[in-house]
Image (spheres, rainbow, N blue to C red):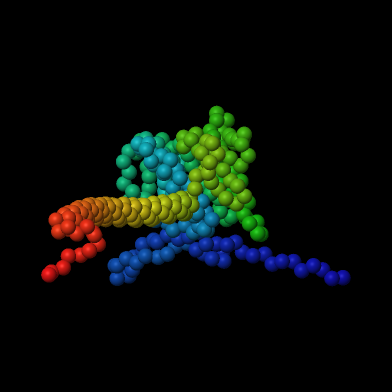
Amino acid sequence: MATATQAPTLPAPAARDPFFYGWRMVPSPREDGTQKWDQVPLTEWDVLHPQEDDFIVQNDVHNDICMYLKNVFRWRLADRPGALVLQDHRVDWQTAGLIPHGPDIVVLFDSQPWDRLRATYPVRDQGARPVLVVEVTSPTTRNKDLDEKVTDYFLAGIPLYAIVDVRSREVESDIRLLAYRPSPEGPLRILSPEPNRVWLPDLNLWLATEGDQVMCLEPSGTPVGDYLTVARMAAEADARASAAERRADEAQAQAGAEKARAEAAVTIAAEEKARAEVAIAIAAEEKARAEAAVAIAAEEKARADEAARKMAELEAELRRLRGDSNPNTSTSNS
């Protein structure tokens, strides 16, 4: 009878890859008295309680979500004095029994000026008030975010602990949101009236999921875009503004050309009118001269007619004196 082949048991990821969780550089002395640095693998416990300058391996989805949340939170609190948003930063809660953590995102109010070159943030020394911690789960350390950190952040007095729980599937990731607040009985799960949303009161924002996307929403429900979205929208707005400015310049240039053509037409019309007026004046002068010539000709004709009449009278008188009764008889020399 054939039996099914049992799949081999694979060793834990850290056994297959000692640097699976990350590493830290640890100094060690050489025999000659000089010092060298050894790369030491991190454990799951080290990820929960990192030391300064630890390199913790994260996946790209985790990094994208954390970077988005940090940028949105910092933008939201830009005008609030003493507000500080830290990402993957070692935080010493300075609470008895708690070892420092490295939360994905922590929001603090009333912080004194902070030296960003320092790798561990001491909460009480800075006079700060933590108001929000957000953890984004990774497959190998998810149980820490869902279990141990719930208790630890309660002990640290965190008023709101939100978990972006990225659960891997074969084809795509499934993301759910969890949130806890402290109560006299211990950490209390917050049940949001809105599906797939957690209200962040100190930021006046919703933390929400839609499919495999994590986003922040305004109270009205309007999404807050990530840097790439905002940059693309800004670029598109700049392009539209440039196009509108270009069209305005073209319209202004066209209007200028039309104005120039209109002014040229007015000038030409004025010149044509002036030439017409000159022509009319010349024609009037020509008419006046013609009328004067006609008058002169009439006077000349009148004088000629008068001279002919007088000549006829003289000839008639001469004939009479000669006794020539025949007016048609012309006089001749004898």
- Nearer to us in this view, 262 or 229: 262
Which residue of the protein is positioned furthest toward the left in this rendering? 334
Locate residue 278: give its quadrant: bottom left
Question: Is residue 227 in view from this perspective?
Answer: no
- Nearer to us in this view, 216 or 6: 216
- Asked if residue 176 lies left or right of residue 302, the reply is right
- Asked if residue 63 lies left or right of residue 300, the reply is right
- Nearer to us in this view, 307 or 316: 316
- Residue drawn at 57 percent across, 62 percent down: 13
Question: Is residue 57 in view from this perspective?
Answer: yes
- Residue drawn at 48 percent across, 50 percent down: 226
* Residue 115 percent across, percent down from the top left: 31, 46
- Nearer to us in this view, 203 or 249: 249
- Residue drawn at 66 percent across, 59 percent down: 170
* Residue 116 percent across, percent down from the top left: 33, 48
- Residue drawn at 32 percent across, 70 percent down: 31
Q: Quadrant of the N terminus?
A: bottom right
Locate residue 124: give its quadrant: top left
- Asked if residue 183 lies left or right of residue 306, the reply is right
Query: Residue 33, relative to residue 164: is it above or below?
Result: below
Which residue of the protein is positioned furthest toward the right in this rendering? 1
* Residue 125 percent across, percent down from the top left: 34, 38
* Residue 114 percent across, percent down from the top left: 32, 43
